[in-house]
Amino acid sequence: MAKQELLITIRDRYRESSKKDKGRILDAFIAVTGHHRKHGIRLLGQSGDAGEKPSMIKGRRIYDEAVREAVITIWEAADRICGQRLKAALPHMVGSMERHDHLDLDPGVRDRLLSASAATLDRLLKPIRPTAGLEAIGQQLPFPVLGIDSDNDSVFINETLITYCANRGIEFTRSRPYRSNDQTWIEQKNGSEVRRFVGHDRYSGQVAGLIAL
């Protein structure tokens, strides 16, 4: 069975399964296809025929889509770095992932991918960047995400996030317009409930991991 046929066959079952069963389906999917784990999660999480490539489309559109899919796969494997760093890493990443059967690129797609500028890479990644972080967070939580609440900044309230929540049955709420005290109340709880125990220092990277242990 081809990779695309396998994806179509198991996608709906994956989306309807429990978190534990999703992990098992994902393990089997990446074992068969050789996809990077993050890319497998993204493919299986797509709705409808989002992951299917139309058979009768002008060549340039298919070609651009193939490049975009390759960029996303490499970007996720590289821990979602910026376009400038991704550009520098592409030759090594492409060669390494092809050797380990994580990529199987048409020569024309490979040439176009390696010749892409940092600005082009950022442009190709722009549509998925806002929700990629949410997908990563959701995979690490021990419970399903039922709702997202934000302030009124357009960084949060936009078509991308609204569509993301609607497709996954996640309730989206926001603080009341012109009621800045709504978020202040949340920050108050951050101070009284969190900072009271961990203090006001910033913990990140290896330091945070050592403190957690």
Image (cartoon, grey):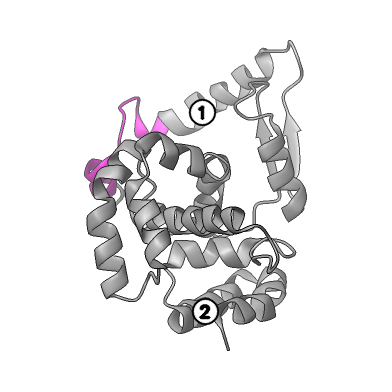
Residue farthest to the bottom, as pictured: 1
Please indicate whether residue 134 sits to the left or right of residue 67 in the image: right
Residues packed near mark 2 inside 10 Å, few (<14), some (14 to 19) or many (20 plus): many
* 37 versus 64 height, above or below: below
Which of 115/202 is in front? 115
Q: Nearer the viewer, mark 2 or mark 1?
A: 2
Residues packed near mark 1 inside 10 Å, few (<14), some (14 to 19) or many (20 plus): few
| Mark 2 or 1, nearer chain start | 2
* 62 versus 101 height, above or below: above
Q: Secondary structure at mark 1?
A: helix
Q: Which residue is mark 2?
A: 29
Please indicate whether residue 208 sits to the left or right of residue 58 in the image: left
Please indicate whether residue 78 sits to the left or right of residue 3 in the image: left
Q: Is residue 94 visible?
A: yes
Q: Position of residue 54 (x, y in %)?
A: 69, 65
Q: Which mark is residue 190?
A: 1
Q: Which amino acid is tagged 1?
A: Asn
Quadrant position of the N terminus in the picture? bottom right
Which residue is found at the position 38% from the left and 69% from the top?
A: 103
Q: Secondary structure at mark 2?
A: helix
